Structures are given as structure tokens and as C-alpha cells.
Amino acid sequence: MLNKYFIIVFIAGLFISCTEKDVIVPPFTAPESNRVVLIEELTGVRCPNCPSGAAMLEDLDALYEGKLVIMAVHGDFDTEPLVQSKYDFRTEESRALENYLRPFWGKPSIAVNRVGDEEELAYIGINRWAGIIEAELAKPHQMNIELNTEFDLSTRKLTIHVGCLPLQDLPGSFNLTVAITESNIVDAQVNQTVIIPDYTHKHVMRKMLTDYKGDQISNGFKANQVVNKRFEFTLPVNEGLWVPENCEVVAFVNKIDGNKKEVLQAAHASVVK
Amino acid sequence: MFTNNYKFFLLLIASWMIVRQGISQDQGVFSGGLESNANFFMRDSLIGASGIPQYDNLLFGGEAWVKMGYQIGTWTLGLRFDAFHNSNLREPNSAYSDQGIRHWFIRKQIKDLEIQAGHIYDQIGSGIIYRAYEERPLFIDNALYGVSLKYSFNDQWSVKGFSGRQKYLFSSYPSIIKGASLDGFYSFGDEKPFTIAPGFGIVNRTYSEETMQNMVNTLRAYIGNDRIETLKYNTYAGSAYATLSYGSWGMYLEGAYKTPEVFFDPNALKTSISGTQTPGKYVQEPGSVLYASLSYGNKGLGVIAEVKRTENFDFRTSPELSLTQGLMNFIPPMSRVNAYRLTARYAPATQLLSEIAYQLDGKYSFNKHASLNINYSQINRLDDLLLYRELYTEFLYKQGRDWRLITGLQWQQYNQEIYEVKPQVPLLNSITPFFDFQYRINKQNSFRLEGQYMHTEQDFGSWIFGMAEYNVAPHWAFELSGMYNIVPTDKAPADENGNAIKLLYPTVGLTYVSGSNRYSLRYVKQVEGIVCAGGVCRLEPAFSGIKLAVSSSF
């Protein structure tokens, strides 16, 4: 008989507790660190939830005031142009990069400084993104990247100067990736259950000036020893695309350690100042 | 979960040996089973079977489950070894690889008390507030990794309680799940008794520190009217349910309520800093489900009526999870589970946030040869948007053991925009007549012919499906089938000029059965479609390749 009462009390005990105190969600404040985080947004013109994802990133970009560098990657999945599409955002590099950022479990997904693991390198579910970005911004600031651009309007030739300044000794192998993104491209996009014919695409990765995995720049950084690189590229002439005022240069340094490819720091600069 | 699977396995075996020694006079029963699939991917970009690693690079993927169980006296032990190698089961567009012991449990009955530890499958009521189960075709395995106690007061009344974490791949989610239920049974009268089996259940989920921190970080970015000011670690869901029966009548009632919690509503509008609105944001609301079914069966007549109302009942281990991840409950589906290829092509997934649905199913046997089944179901959103409607009729005629004919007609309306998140597609209307004829030539040889025609002007257009199956008992079965897009629309695969193509999706296969071993080899071209199990569905992309399946039980 005692057994019965003991079981009832035990099970009731699972639920008995004092009144729970609410957890307050504090209003937003931007972190003071100089760390700049790379966001590789895996997206596609046929992806019904991607406009929500892009809107979320725009919000977060505005909140974090320049601490995010966003690159929208239109790879293989959900990227085939629509009947209404004027442009095809897919490139060999974007396809290769999307595969390089696997595994991901659908779109939109974002790789945040490539800190995911073998289960998930790019995170699906826009609801999770802010938390992951916040955690990444809170990590120690290890490197500065300075990015300067020179653009000749007549020849459309772009010259890029990249300076990497490690703030401490950093052992290991490091790659530098430089790419050009373009915003304000007006073209069709699936949004939930409709097609928006004049959707404004932002941060579209248009060209990589290094290998899609990056080019190796160091086998171990020494504190305060600057590593410089220079790149040149002529913007193609293409109606509606490659508008210099809408283009931006993105650069980032990541550490290669087996399957890991964590980004230390990112930077971006407009093509036309 | 396990730092070293092999050490754990040896420990479990050692435990078995000790248990055996303690009950040396009992023999015990050892049982087990194997299920395995191997897929060889053959790229066919025309049907959309391309653009993922399996078609482009890996070429091969598969999965296997090997389970073992041992029962001796009042002890029951079980474990299962799972292997996924470049498998597309977890997510059809990616490759997943891992292996190890993914499921184990120990169960012991001590007089009126049952103790279970390890991975536990269980449910409360019909599963509306809690269900831990496995559904392999959808990669659902949300067993509770923890402890469960069940105490039987007598033959009629029992109480159970459990606590643990939900399984996630080869590990577990961090949130803690606790629950309890009280189940009983009463019978009144002797000759024609009225019986009632009432029950009450409650489930609590407590966020981990990590989940709470992630949620706070996420919600900090919400501004204006979207802002959620406070959160709680704990969410509670409770339900009351009862099964009643009297003579030929039966009834099941269940009502469930969930305390306010944060969940992601894909239709709620979120306002950005610039003032524009986009669908999809976290909201904080309570949830509820009401479910009732009434059945009658007598003298060849069987009727079932069901009704269900669901509001904001997306209950997961973490609000950050979506699709089939982290589901803690199971809400009964409200449409017929169809078996034929074309009648099952459009199946409605249970909507967790907003649904009101009913279903009527009647079956009448005219005599021992003939019977008729009629089913009608309708599913709406709470704002009255039609999601699904189906009228299904099936006539069966059976001539002894020699031959059997099933024929009927299905009419469907299916909201493809909602169920498949496809833009600008109209409500799908389809009419599908079908037949299924089986003939036994002699004791060893029999054949089966199946045919369906689906008329629809939406989605990929109209289809015709035919299948011939020849069985040589007790070992062999041969299968040849084809699904042909006889009247394709502009949504169907197109040629280089953009013209829709009449594509054939063939399947050729053979099956060999030897005792409890079953081997199946099939060449398959399969159109994209919905795969469902119990109202939980996902969109599967097209498949092209060879499928080998081996299963066994011992």
C-alpha cells in the first residue's frame, strides 16, 4: 500500500515547484567588439522562405551596424531561374561554394563564420540566426582586415588592396577569400506562395577573385605582422548587372584545420567610394 | 551520447549475462530484426533527380537498422544498431553519415511496478500532448532518453511518470521532458456492459540554459509590436481523454491545452526596421486541440465519424526546431490513408497551428463476397480557407480464394500552396478511378493487376498508372509498373524549348523471400511527391536509380 502513495508523491513531485520567475528579454544593444562576422546566406530564387531570411538578415545588419558582412550564395538548390527571371545568379563558384558549405538542411540557411559542425555547417531556420550571430560576435577579436578599393570609371577596372593584421600569434594554416557581391538587382523571386517579379536581391555573390575555398596566405600569423595582397578585376558590361555603385568587395580570413574552416574576421568595402 | 559505443555494448552484454545467471532456470527469448536499404543514384536532370551530392559525386547511399531483444523472466532488454552512409533519408537533398548504437532500453517488472530506462517509446492518450515514436520513412525517431515508471493499482487503474530528453540523431536534445498520466477502466452492467476508459495526462518541457539564451538573443532583435518581453523556461500541456463503448457503439474524446509558449508562426507578419512586413516570426500564445470520434459496427455495417480542432499546438523540444525535428506530440490525421500510387499522390499533412477537420467513413458488407467503403473528409484552416477535401469510394468483390476485384473512384481538392509551399498554384482538383485485380492461378502462382487514372488540370497534369505483379509462392515476386504523365501541364518537366514532356516513370523489380529473409531489387524512376505517415508529411524530390532492400527477423 505504501508503494502506491510513494509512486503518486514521486510523480506529483516531478511537477511541483515554486512559481517560475519570468526571464526578461532585454532590449537590443550592439556589442562593442571590433569583430566582424561573415554571413554566407544560402538562398535561391525558387526558395519560398528566402525573402523572409533576407529580411531577417537586413534587420540584423541594421541592428549590428556594420559588424556583419553578408554574401548571398545562389548555388544549386532552389536556384534555377523562374520563367519571369531576367538573370541567372548561379555561377560555377557559387555552386562550388554551396557544396563546400554542406551539410545544410534546406534554405534559407546561413553559415556564420563557418563555425557549424559536421551535422550542420549552415544553419536552417531564421528563428535561430540572431542567437548564433550574437554568440559569434561575443568571441575574442583576433585580427583586423583593412580593405581599400580603387575603381576606374572609364575602364571599369577595380583594384583591391587587402591588409591582414593579426592581433596575436595565430598558429595554423590560413586562407584569404576575396569576392564581389552586388545589391539592388531587381528580378523575380518566389515568396511563400507568390512570385514577386520585381524583388530587390541584395548581396548576390557575383565573382570570386580567389579560389572558392580561398587562397592560402599564411602558415602561421605573427602578432602585428601585416600581410598584404592585391587583386585586379574589370567589371563586365552587362545591362542591369555589374552596376559599380551596387557592387561591394568582401574579404575574409579563415583557418583551415582538417574539416574545420572557421572565419576569424571579415571586411567589406564599396567598389565606388 | 556514448563516448565509446563498443564499451557500452560490452557492458550491456555483461549485464545480460548477470541477469541470466540470476534467473538460471529460465531459458529466455532472444529475438531480433534487420531492415536495410541501399540506393544507387543515377542522375536524371530531366525529372529533377540531380543537383545533390548523391547524384553528382557520391553515387551510393544507404541505411540499416539491426535490433536485438532479450526477454527473460521479468526482464526485457533491447538495443538497436543504426547505420546511415551517405543517406538521403534525413534530408532528401543532402548526404548524412553516422553509425552506432542508437537505441537501447532495460525494462523490469517488480510486482505492480514497471521500471524502464534507456530509450523509451510511449504516448499519452492519442498522443496529442505526448508521443515518442519511430517512423523510419520520415526519419522520425523521437524516443525519450530517460526513465519511466508505471504502477498498476489493479487491473483497471495505473499511473505512469517519465523524465528524460528527446533523442536527436545519436545524441539527445538538451531540453528536459517530464510527464505523467493516470489511466483507468470502468465497466457497468453485465449482459450489455457500458465501459469507460478515462485518462488524464500532463507533460512539461523545460528549456536548457542554451536554448533559453538562444531564444533571448533571437528575440532581442524583435522591435515594436513584434517584441516579446518575457519568456518562461517551462511549458505545460495537459489533456483529458476517455474511450466509451456500449454495445455496437464506441466513442473517443480528448481535449488538450498547452500553456502560452513561444513558437514560430510562418504566417504571422514581422515588421522590419525599415517598416516593411514579411511573413514568419515568433509569437507567444496558448494552444488547444479538441478531438472526438464516434463509431458504430454491427451486422456488416461499420461507421466512423471524427472531428478535430487544432489551434497553436506546435509542441517541440525547442522552438528553434522546425519540420519533423523535435516534435513531442502527434495530432491524429483527419483524412483517409490511401494505398494506391495515384490516390496517395496528394496527401494532407496535419496542420499544427490552425486546422478544423472532420471525416466520415462507412463500410457495408453485402454478403461474404461483396463490400462497399465510402469515405469523406474535409480540412479547413480556422479562418475557413479550404485545405483538403476528399470523397473516396471502394467496392470489393471476392470470389472465394480464386480472385478478388477492388474498384472505386476518388475525388480530391488539395491546397498545394499550403501543403507544398508552392507559389501561385491553384487549388488542385483531381478525379481518380482505379482497379486492383488479383487472380490465383493455382496454389503456387498468382498475379495482380493494378490501374489508376488521375485526371487533373493542375500541378504536373493527368497521370495514368499501371502495375503487373506475378507471384510464385512462396519465394518469388516480380513487379513491372509505370506512371505516365499522359497530359502534362506547364508545371511538368519540359524540354529545351520549354514544352512539357510526357514522361514515363517506370519501376521494374523482383522480390525473393526465404523464410524470414526478404530481398528486393528494384529499378525506380519516381516523380517528386509527398510522403506521409500518420499525417506527418514531407516533400520528397524525384528519384532515379536502383534500390536494394534486405530485411529479416529472427
Image: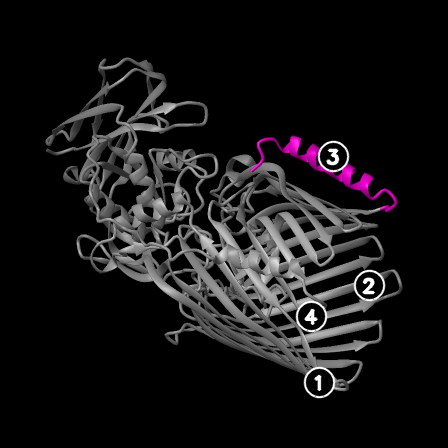
Q: Is residue B22 magenta?
A: yes
Q: Which residue is mark 4?
A: B156
Q: Which residue is mark 2?
A: B446
Q: Is residue A101 magenta?
A: no
Q: Residues within 10 Å of mark 2 (few under 14, many from 20)?
A: some
Q: In the rendered structure, which amino acid carries the disc numbered 2? A: Ser
Q: Residues within 10 Å of mark 1 (few under 14, many from 20)?
A: few
Q: Nearer the viewer, mark 4 or mark 2?
A: 4
Chain letter, disc 2 residue: B
Mark earlier in primary sequence (1, 2)? 1
Chain letter, disc 3 residue: B
Residue A17, how many percent across, how many down? 44, 55
How far is mark 1 from mark 4, CA to CA? Answer: 20 Å
How far is mark 3 from mark 1, CA to CA? Answer: 52 Å
Magenta: predominant secondary structure element? helix
User: In the rendered view, would you say B134 is above or below B260?
Assistant: above
- Which SS class for mark 3? helix
Q: Nearer the viewer, residue B519 or B534?
A: B534
Residue B161, how many percent across, how many down? 58, 57
Span of residues in magenta: B1-27
How far is mark 4 from mark 2, CA to CA? Answer: 48 Å
**Residue B38 appearing in the image:** no
Q: Nearer the viewer, residue A113 or A163?
A: A113
Q: Are marks 3 and 4 on the same chain?
A: yes
Q: List the single residue furthest toward the front.
A: A2
Mark drawn on residue B14: 3
Mark drawn on residue B247: 1
